[in-house]
Image: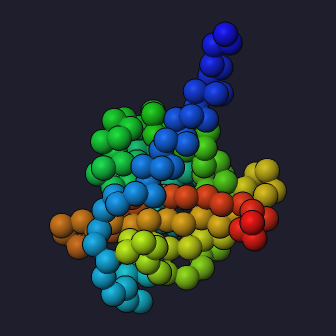
Amino acid sequence: MQKPTAFGKMAGFIGVLMMVLVTAFGSHAKNLTSSDADAFQTVISAQVTAFKNDQWDKAFSLAAPKIQAMFGNVQRFQQMVLNGYEAVARPKIFEFGETTTVSGRPAQMVYVVGPDDLARKAIYFMEQQSDGSWRISGVVLKRIADLSS
């Protein structure tokens, strides 16, 4: 019997993570306003800028508390992002789409082309904090070519 490779373990971890992130992980549904959309885009832009500048502490601080607890530290968060979400960590193209709700959760659609030149749609799930601010509570990436299937 073959032992799982590091890549196989990481792929399994990312798969489990994706399932966790698309389950009920945060805010209750609410009517989203243009102010919410602006706030989502400000937070997401700040995180992407932090990724590009290797400011991993800053990027980690923009994740919702449940995401921070899941990874426990900046180094694990960085490893996960670079191994599974390089398209948003190192985008060639990054454009905001609509602000909406997905399964009752506030979400911001983003169209991105990563360093591999593949077009993707990113769904950023947002979670409102007790102070009214927003943080990122998960991201799901789907290749654009795969959306028709």
- Residue 80, can we see it? no
Residue 57 visible in the shown view: yes
Give the residue drawn at x 46%, y 40%. Answer: 77
Q: Position of residue 96 (x, y in %)?
A: 59, 76
Up-down relation of residue 5 to residue 53 (above or below): above
Residue 88, quarter of picture: bottom right
Seen from this angle, which residue lies furthest top? 1
Instruction: Please state if 109 lies on the left or on the right of 143 as rendered.
Output: left
Out of 51 and 127, give the one closest to the viewer.
127
- In front of the other: 58 or 66: 66
Left or right, residue 15 beside residue 63: right
Residue 29, image x and y in percent?
A: 32, 77
Q: Which residue in the rendered view is the most extreme toward the left? A: 130
Residue at figure coordinates x 42%, y 72% from the top left: 103
Residue 93 sits in which quadrant? bottom right
Q: Quadrant of residue 76?
A: top left
* Quadrant location, the C terminus: bottom right
Badge count: 0
* Image: 99 above or below 130: below
Residue drawn at x 49%, y 65% is 124
Q: Decide: is 131 above or below 33.
A: above
Q: Residue at x 41, y 89 (%)?
A: 34
User: Looking at this view, is 50 or 16 the one in front?
Assistant: 16
Location of residue 101 with respect to 3 vertically, above or below:
below
Quadrant assignment for the N terminus: top right
Q: What colour scheme has been applied to the protein in the rendered image?
A: rainbow
Image position, residue 20 (x, y; %): 42, 49
